[in-house]
Amino acid sequence: MTTETQKEKIVALAKSLIGKPYKYGAKEEEAPDFFDCSSFTQYILKQIGIAIPRSTIEQAAEGRETNLENLEVGDLIFAHGTHGHYNPRFPQGIGHVGVYVGNDAIIHAASKRTNEKPIIEQGGVMESTLEEFIKACTPIITIKHY
């Protein structure tokens, strides 16, 4: 369970990374210069001492499940997005993740695919309202607290 100090660090760090460029498949060693959505959430939680897997679908398999009514700062919201990854636990697919920072806001590394092969995406770390995030990434698949 995250402490209040950890939650404050999540918010400050996530906000400090707004504007960092998106890179499809960004590797852990490329942070904090480049992120994709799951490397962003992995980096944020690592900075407060919480280790989570690299991919969205693996991240979604960990943590304690919660819901929109009980959101806390630091919770990760997993959505189908436009390009999902699938497995038996999440047959509907998970393609995007963001971190809830309180005050009805979520920070995430978002992109728009401009080419399929090779995959090229443009975007960056941005802040959205929870409503904007849900509308753009529907359906929400799961929400996790670490």
Image (cartoon, helix red, strand yellow):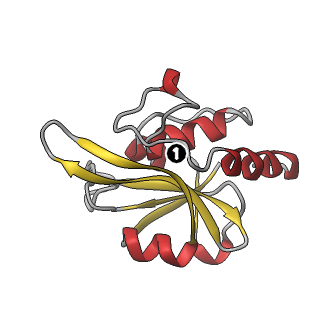
Residue at left offset 39%, top offset 37%: 23
Please name the residue that numbered disc 1 is placed on.
Answer: 62
Residue 24, how many percent across, how many down? 34, 38
Residue 72, how many percent across, how many down? 71, 64
Q: As rendered, which of 38 and 24 lies closer to the eye? A: 24
Judged left or right of residue 137, residue 107 is: right
Q: Residue furthest right?
A: 5
Residue at left offset 73%, top offset 72%: 103
Residue 20, how many percent across, how many down? 54, 42
Q: Tag 1: Cα neighbours inside 10 Å, few (<14), some, or many (≥20)?
A: few
Judged left or right of residue 132, residue 120 is: left
Residue 115, how many percent across, how many down? 17, 47
Residue at left offset 63%, top offset 44%: 17
Q: Is 62 located above or below residue 136 in the figure?
A: above
Q: Is 89 located above or below residue 26 in the figure?
A: below
Q: Is 60 located above or below residue 26 in the figure?
A: below
The quadrant where residue 48 appears: top right
Q: Identify the amino acid type marked 1.
A: Glu
Q: As rendered, which of 51 and 114 lies closer to the eye? A: 114
Q: As rendered, which of 60 and 34 lies closer to the eye? A: 34
